[in-house]
Amino acid sequence: MAFPSASPSLPQRFWRKLSSRWHWRASRSRFPRLTLVSQFFPPDFAATGQLLDDLTARLASRGLQVQVLTGIPAYAYNRPDAERIEFQPGRCIRRTHASRFWPQRIRGRAINGVLFCLRITLRLLRCSRRGDLILYTTEPPYLPLLGWLLHRLTRTPYLVLLYDLYPDVLVELNVLPASHWLVRLWRQFNSWVCADAQELIVLSEPMAERVRQHVPAAAAKLSVIPSWADNQRIRPLAKADNWFVQREQLHDRFTVLYSGNQGRCHDLVTVLAAALLLRRDPGVQFLFIGSGPQNGRLRGLVRDWGLCNCRFLPYQELSDLPFTLAAADLALVTLSIEAEGLVAPSKLYGHLAAGTPIAAITPACSYLHELVEREGCGRWFANGDAEGLAAWIEQLRADPSAAATFGHAARHLLERTATPEIVTDHYLQLIQQHLPEHKPLPASIEQQARSAFAPSP
């Protein structure tokens, strides 16, 4: 008979943590370190945190020492706590206490973000004394301002990864008028942040153009690096082989999927209007996985309109993502009219990896409009065009071979432009340009970066 092994005693756990800490400091201290700062990181379900988790793990596997400064889950989570410090090969994750005041409301997120910045300041001062290169995200959106202040005090070099463009988002969503003193002050802060940053990274060309308009001097520092998805982990999968499809009884329904944050920058009313037009078709189902500020409104509309073809599921475990994405016959990627050029939906890339046709619901000037039609991976619909969306859903359902053609094009687009290897190479090239000169890079990093960007023979 096999007996379960006893859990480690308190002295054993203490010794393991002490050994991990010593190894982290001693084994790689002679190499430069990148410190990444973001309020959201797994086990929080926020998409930005999941991408940063993957990116930092890949950078660490290339030989770069990476430290992540983040908070405990505070936005979308099913585990209320996480390890305060984790040591992994080449990577250390440090979590600080974070408030959870109204995480789905703008005011609550603003308060939580300010408190996160205050709590993380002392740790950042330590990183500055070590001479780390620091990568700030816009989670929370005023975090780069803290980086600029620390740079002024310590001359620590920093990069900024702009996931969303603030205060433009607040202006376009009518939270603040463009003439508000806070907007004017915030724009001034942004000009200072951009002036002193080593590099500014945005997710799309329209976002880069917005930055150029507000801060022309930042043009030379701008790099466009898209989001990505793991094409080895997320793959096309037949419904018969997908346990999630079987569990949720989706095998005999044409599933139209919206997966992820149901935020204010996304047009979901057009989606529900299409569901209203198709409400008498028992073969079509609209599935919403996730949550966000619009979740309550969407559920209310479904109830008021008597829609039986809409289902809502909470965020699923990250390990289940390959199966939830592969359950879709059609994937929805949306932007509201106000959000164009301010955000770039990362959910697009997971759907591309799953080989799913894309329905892009955006303004006509959106880069997604050009992308899906140029690459043949889906169709574009103007905001409010529920009739067009409903008609295309019926066409795809009636013609599986056409749907498969769109899906193959989607998968090919990801493999050509946004695999983890391609994106990691771009980040690595930027980072290595700004690491401290007195600490040499591991040879493996230099060799990989050179080979990735060497001209083709």
Image (cartoon, helix red, strand yellow):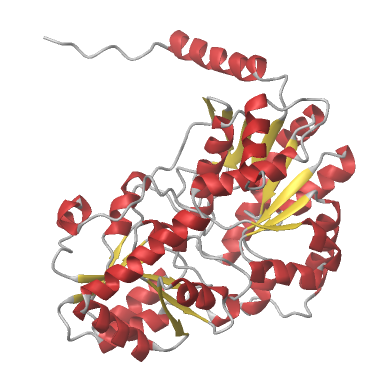
- 360 vs 285, nearest the viewer: 360
Q: Hey, which residue is sitting farthest left in the picture?
A: 1
For the N terminus, the image quarter is top left
Q: Is residue 19 left or right of residue 317?
A: right
- Which residue is drawn at the image coordinates 66% and 43% (left, top)? 454
Q: Is residue 232 left or right of residue 285?
A: right
- Which residue is drawn at the image coordinates 41% and 60% (left, top)? 412
- Quarter of the image for residue 36 reads top right
- 251 vs 6, nearest the viewer: 251
Residue 177, percent from left and from top: 72, 80
Tell me, yes or no, if residue 330 can be seen here: no
Residue 433, percent from left and from top: 77, 41
Q: Is residue 61 above or below residue 151?
A: above
- Quarter of the image for residue 63 reads top right
Residue 12, percent from left and from top: 44, 9
- 105 vs 140, nearest the viewer: 140
